[in-house]
Image: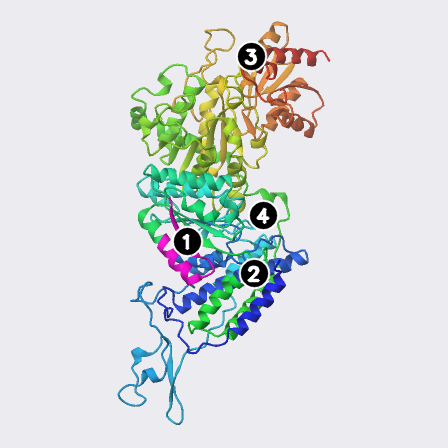
Amino acid sequence: MTTPHDLDDRLRAELAALGAPDQRRDLGEPLPDGGALTGAQALALFDAQLTSRLLDLAGRWLSGFGEGYFTVESAGHEGDAAVAAALRPTDPALLHARSGAFYCLRAAQAAGAFPAPEPGRSSSESAPTGAVSYQDLEGPGAGETEAGSLPVGAGIVVDADGDATVVVPDLPQPAPDDAFAAAARDVLRGIVASAEEPAAGGRAKVFGRADLAVVPTTSAAGSHLPRAVGLGLALERLRRGARPADGEAEAAPWPADAVVVCAFDDGAADHAAATAALNTTGWYDHTGLRIPVLFVCADGGASAEGWVAATLRARPGIRYFAADGTDVAATYRVAAEAAEWVRRQRRPAVLHLSAVRLMEQGDGDAARDPLLATARLLVTSGYASGEELLARYDERGWQLRRVAEEVLDEPKLASPVEIVRELAPRRPVRVSRAVAEAAAHAAGPGAGARAEAFGGKPPELTGPLTLAQSINAALADGMLDHPGTAVFGHDVAAQGGVYGVTEGLRDRFGAARVFDTLPDATSILGLGLGAGLAGLLPVPEIRHLTLLHGAEDQLRGEAATMRFLSRGAFRNPMVVRVPGLASPEGLGGHDRNDDSLGALRDVPGLVVAVPARPDDAAPMLRTCLAAARVDGSVCVFVEPIALYHVRDLYTDGDDEWTTEYAEPGAWADRHVPIGRARVYGIGSAEDLTIITFGNGVRMSLRAAATLAEEGVGSRVVDLRWLAPLPVADIIRESSATGRVLVVDETRRTGGVGEGVLSALVDTGYVGAARRVAALDSFVPLGPAARQVLVSAEAITQGARTLLAR
């Protein structure tokens, strides 16, 4: 294993041994072998690489005395600096934990510190084949020179004897606070958890910065790749005329011809999220949809030899490029070709770079050190001597040491408020105002378009609606209000979704805004993450709650963390619709009956909504759409499958589970804020409080009617929001009776009921409490489901037991 000390000593020795070039070349000249880089550009790449290397060493040094908290090194992967150089600083970049050199070069690019090609010379033009000597300058007469034959920046010195010598300027030393030092400061702040760190503000160590177009990612096994696909698809839709969520095309944060670059390593190439992203990209290309994404895989050799290349080459619909990632000249040439192809064709490509991991593998890899390879290039091309590069390495080292000592004195996050401030802002007044504005638009300037969209018969004129019909109408109104709203998922367009909830939306709003996807939940959520990042308002549908569990990290690790990791500079608003919970008859078995919501409630900042009635579903969906737009909220809208098409409450034909759709003029008055419950009073409503949600609401109302016949007055509290829980409403309604029955259709262990009871305990509730919950079991098929799920009879019996205490 190569230690940081060994790596530093070896590099210093190798640099010193490089010697001096036979002939000096000015930095403004292109590489002598016809490469696309100039000497100044090659030197900037070297600066990015050595800054990244020194950051690795600094991270180990800081952690050695307890002041550094992140030591994932980029050593051996520094060739990706050339990838950054081949792209534009406005191209959105989603990096991984070993992308230090890319980040440093991107910072230099944005600051104008990466030299542009010499005016009048294409980057692909052939360069001179050799350096210019004094003899080359001899013309018709001794000492006569042609100024055009001099190296750029060179001069002629004539001594006292009249002898002339061509002098090329010495290699310039780095400025104390240049762009590379600034990039190093960003990274070091992340390593020491400084509150001044520009991306996450001390909350995490990430490569991210809004003004560099670097989107922070968790880099967890390629989990950011699905977002990159979604961003690429959204950028292309915006380029072709789609409108962002606020209706103004210029509000889109990325240039129209931007290319998304997404970096990952060979360790992530075999993970599910990366596989899903690459598969989805190829599928879209196969179907004719364009996605301008350049995937960059840095292959450190951890997989079986040849496996990564074979896997990436075999991806249909994705063009394959490869380069030796330890050779910056070759990497730059191939990366520029790949980036130009993606930008011009608006199609996906993958750039496969060979790399090494110098501080994680054996000493044999040291011979392929990309930093040393760039140094050799500078010396053999005549731009610098080994001693000059060693001096540069030392100067950068002292520069970073000084910066590291400075950031150590910067403040750390010191209070819970500071930490969670950007996690999930809640601005209920603004959300309420957005709902009112949508209502005013629907009733005023947008009335004509609304009438046309609904075929002349808006939903408030169609009679009582079911839960599914109410959601469908609210989705249509949301799409009318927000031009950037897009509804998508497996079969949501052609078939209207598995339960018909999105039926007719594609006919009303077109295939660009309502479209089908692959069935993979990871890919669907990734499309939403990218669309939100691009300025759209995505409403993806996951076919079943069971399918969402396999893709939860797209919510936990990617969606919910975006504001947290960027101090609010980036956001990915999204409303995820998912049919869930259980059917009383266990229809479809385990696949279609899932009452597990604990994993969603555990995600910080995630909004989890469960509408039970049609007259709650529409306003709650409007609230989620407004919160996504105003606050960048990520909402999961869990729709009870068993209630989609229910019409009756107490007896067949009573139609008491259907309701009229509110006309726009009533939307503001019927607004449902996040975290507010609904209370039903049955009888005197003084004896018992039943707290429930979803299917439990209908069952609890039926149970309360039975209890009312026995002289028991109940108040039924529909939580409506499972995250955040309506704690104030819970406490108020519980204290009103002093007897609480929690009806929880999720499981006893990890279920919603545990959160309700905890809220009661935490706030000092002293009354009686009991719980009726589903068993800790998966839902079986058919009538057996009744044995494990909550029923109205169980609720009634639980209430009697509680009242008998």
Q: Gap in Å between the C-alphas at discs 3 and 1?
A: 58 Å
At label 3, the amino acid type is: Pro
Q: Residue at x 38, y 90 (%)?
A: 163
What crowding class fits label 1: few (fewer than 14 Cα within 10 Å), some (14-19), or many (20 or more)?
A: some
Mark toward the start of the polypeptide (3 vs 4): 4
At label 4, the amino acid type is: Arg
Residue holding disc 4: 203
Which residue, as the protein is rendered here, is positioned at the far left?
140
Pointer 3 and pointer 4: residues touching (CB < 8 Å)? no
Residue holding disc 3: 783
Q: Is residue 409 visible?
A: no
783 relative to 296 in the view: left or right: right
Q: Gap in Å between the C-alphas at discs 3 and 4?
A: 49 Å
Mark toward the start of the polypeptide (3 vs 1): 1
Q: Is residue 39 above or below residue 65?
A: below
Residue holding disc 1: 322
Stretch in magenta: 318-338
From the image, state whether disc 3 or disc 1 is nearer to you.
1
What crowding class fits label 2: few (fewer than 14 Cα within 10 Å), some (14-19), or many (20 or more)?
A: few
Q: If the image is split into quadrants, where does the N terminus sit?
A: bottom right
Q: Is residue 57 above or below residue 792?
A: below
**Residue 625 in which image quadrant:** top left
